[in-house]
Image (spheres, rainbow, N blue to C red):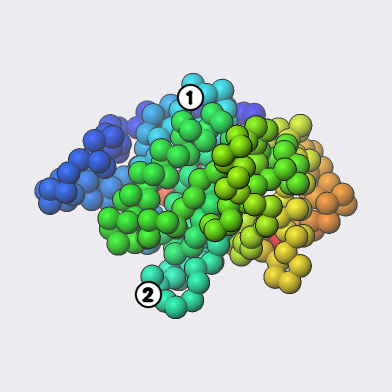
Amino acid sequence: MTRRATKRVKKEQMLKPDDIDSGSDASTNEDKSQSYEKAVNLPAHQTKHLPELVYHFPCIDTSFRLTQRNDTNSTGSSLWLSPQVLSSFLIHTYGKVQQKDSSAARKRVLELGSGTGLLSLLMARLGWDTVATDIPPVLESVLKPNVEAGLYQLVNEGKAEKDQIRVCQLDWTVLPERWHWHPELGFPSAQEHVDADTRNTQTTTEQHFDLILTADTIYEPSLIRSLLFTIAHLYQRQAESKPTILLALERRDPTQVNEAFRLASEDYDLPFKQIPAKRVRKIFDTLGDGAAWSRDDWDGVEIWKL
């Protein structure tokens, strides 16, 4: 993977942990809002060194503070470019926020390899019931803290319900027949060792999803088949109403990417189609940061759909 030189970000663009958790004082909330509004989104390769950052979505008047870790030996513990670009596509496609008082059931989205949790938090902001998944150490060190802080913020701002995001461990290398589904909430858990108490509160009855997301998860050759097998199972088990699947990636290794989509189509019956690059650029320029960034910063990002 090519390493780009990082640029230091001014401290004024960051929030301290206390900024989001300190009391309900009006001036504190106002200061926090002003800090959020001043947040500047930078390409992910320029922020890898930051322990935390604020990611701003001005078009939906929302910002999230994200914790990052560089001591986990995992690529999932920091923000990447493909979720940044995919977030604009999600706002463009699903930006009509579902009303909380609507009698219709909220739509459900599952994210594979959630990492920092940015996309899962965004989908909750857009009114979806969201299941964010990953594995240790990312699960405990980054994903859960970010989701807890972000959901707390959304609930207090009246922009989400407290039950709109669930976080669970989903290991792609664990076969689906060993997955356990929560009997009431309908999210899966896949891990090598499940204690008896947990197993007794779970079921093998699988639940419905309207959308499956995954971003920057095609990077390690040894995991590609496991990822595709997981996606295929989740997609094909829904006989009557298939979920939409969106997969975003950086084309770092064209040979590996091409092989991944060949396997998806030929071995797993997942005929992904690429969203035209021109359309992705237009959406990111309009709803994201494409117009403010150098095209070279993000031009290798692609979005594929099934």
> Of the residues shown, which amino acid type is indicated by label 1?
Asn
Residue 46 placement: quadrant: top left
User: Residue 295 location, x and y as percent?
Assistant: 53, 46
Horizontal and vertical percent position of residue 275: 66, 60
Extreme residue in the bottom direction: 103
Q: Assign a secondary structure to mark 1.
A: loop
The picture quadrant where one finds residue 81 is: top right
State which quarter of the image contains the N terminus.
top right
Return the residue nearer the eye: 302 or 197.
197
In the depicted view, which residue is nearer to us: 250 or 164? 164
Q: Is residue 277 visible?
A: no
Which amino acid, by three-letter code, is at mark 2? Answer: Asp
Q: Report the side of 57 relative to 2 (left or right).
A: left
Q: Residue at x 57, y 48 (%)?
A: 201
Q: Where is residue 222? Give x, y as percent.
A: 76, 32
Mark 2 crowd level (few <14, some 14–19, many ≥20, 10 Å Cα): few
Dot label at residue 70 = 1
Label 1 crowding class (10 Å Cα cut-off): few <14, some 14-19, many 20+?
some
In the rendered structure, which disc, 1 or 2, sits on the residue that comes first in sequence? 1
The total number of labels drawn is 2
Residue 193 position (above or below residue 178): above
Secondary structure under tag 2 reads loop
Write the residue at 44% across / 70% down. Answer: 98
Q: Nearer the viewer, residue 204 or 58?
A: 204
The residue where tag 2 is placed is 101
Rounded to the nearest whole Å, what is the CA distance between mark 1 and mark 2? 41 Å
State the quadrant of the C terminus: bottom right
Q: Is residue 48 above or below residue 174?
A: above
Q: Is residue 44 left or right of residue 16?
A: right
- Give the residue at x 51% y 45%: 167
